Image (cartoon, grey):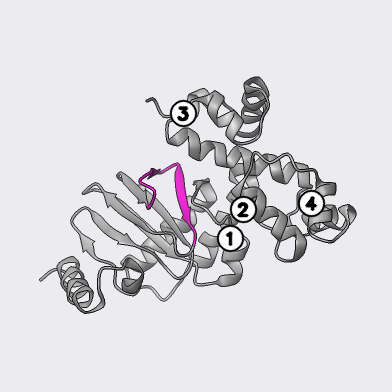
């Protein structure tokens, strides 16, 4: 019996006694010929590939492609399934660190596969293939953070009122509540909020919010939403302003990024 078949059988036996809730099978994920069935992890996960085709299906039915150019961050407890081509070489990396997860976006997001990240992924794959005691997972996670800092998303403030503001804006990126009003809502001062964003994320509040909006716009474009609709959903009052900001951030227009309907 192959390793894949053994894991599938073990998972089926456990599922029979635990029920169908994917959260209960966190330690053993069913592995099928096409990938993994619905499941989630206690910590965040990075999916990276060096070859083949991999698609992650999220709980809301949307799909995210994992390619040689773009890895995928999945936050803790994010229910997902994975399917892959027969020639796919996939490296799933579980962070295993609540502190690391707290600095990452609380929603799935693409990660630019930079040359440095690709090298870290390849080294970890080789180490696992040859049962090497070396571990390059910290390097992979460090480069994931570096890639986010390079423009794919935004790090959350670590604590306090700034984190509450950040979480609210992640849920509603179209909000036009001023920083002064956020300060009143969180019982702090505008200056304190501004300083917290710079100190804890390395970005001004304005820059942080723009990056969040543009990062979320990519997810919406991946789902095939029209550019004008996406612009409104992430808080831009004009499509032309959104297109200009998107081009400055990613080097191409949102029309080029969008998936054809």
Q: Residues within 10 Å of mark 1 (few under 14, many from 20)?
A: some
Mark 1 → mark 4, Cα distance in angstroms: 31 Å
Q: Which residue is mark 1?
A: 142
**Label number found at residue 146:** 2
| Quarter occupied by the N terminus | bottom left
| Residue 210 x/y as whole percent | 69, 39
Q: Which residue is mark 3?
A: 258
Residue at the far left in the pictured view: 1
Q: CA distance from mark 2 to mark 4?
A: 28 Å
Q: Looking at the image, tell me whether mark 3 or mark 2 is earlier in sequence order.
A: 2
Q: To which residue does mark 4 refer? A: 182
Magenta span includes 130: no
Q: Secondary structure at mark 2?
A: helix
Which residue: 48% across, 33% down?
221
Tag 1 and tag 2, C-beta contact below 8 Å? yes
Real-space CA distance between mark 1 and mark 2, rounded to the nearest whole angstrom: 6 Å
Instruction: Judge from the rendering whether residue 128 lies leftward or rightward of residue 213; answer left or right.
Output: left
Residue 135 vs 114, above or below: the answer is: below
Part of the protein shown in magenta = 59-75
In the displayed image of the protein, which residue is found farthest to the top? 240
Q: Is residue 155 visible?
A: no
Q: Does dot 4 land on a helix, a strand or a loop? A: helix
Residue 162: quadrant of the picture: bottom right
């Amino acid at each position: 019996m192959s390793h894949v078949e053994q894991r599938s059988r073990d998972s089926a036996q456990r599922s029979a006694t635990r029920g169908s809730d994917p959260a209960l099978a966190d330690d053993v994920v069913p592995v099928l010929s096409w990938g993994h069935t619905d499941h989630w992890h206690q910590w965040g996960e990075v999916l990276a590939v060096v070859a083949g085709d991999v698609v992650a299906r999220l709980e809301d039915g949307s799909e995210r492609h994992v390619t040689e150019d773009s890895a995928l961050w999945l936050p803790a407890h994010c229910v997902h399934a994975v399917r892959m081509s027969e020639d796919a070489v996939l490296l799933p990396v579980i962070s295993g660190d609540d502190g690391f997860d707290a600095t990452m976006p609380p929603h799935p997001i693409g990660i630019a596969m930079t040359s440095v990240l690709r090298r870290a992924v390849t080294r970890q794959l080789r180490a696992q293939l040859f049962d090497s005691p070396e571990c390059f997972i910290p390097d992979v996670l460090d480069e994931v953070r570096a890639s986010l800092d390079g423009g794919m998303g935004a790090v959350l403030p670590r604590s306090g009122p700034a984190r509450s503001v950040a979480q609210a804006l992640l849920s509603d990126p179209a909000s036009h509540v001023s920083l002064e009003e956020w300060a009143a809502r969180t019982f702090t001062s505008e200056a304190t909020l501004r300083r917290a964003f710079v100190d804890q994320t390395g970005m001004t509040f304005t820059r942080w919010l723009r990056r969040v909006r543009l990062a979320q716009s990519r997810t919406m474009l991946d789902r095939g939403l029209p550019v004008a609709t996406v612009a409104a959903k992430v808080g831009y009052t004009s499509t032309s302003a959104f297109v200009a900001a998107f081009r400055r951030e990613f080097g191409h227009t949102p029309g080029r990024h969008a998936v054809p309907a």
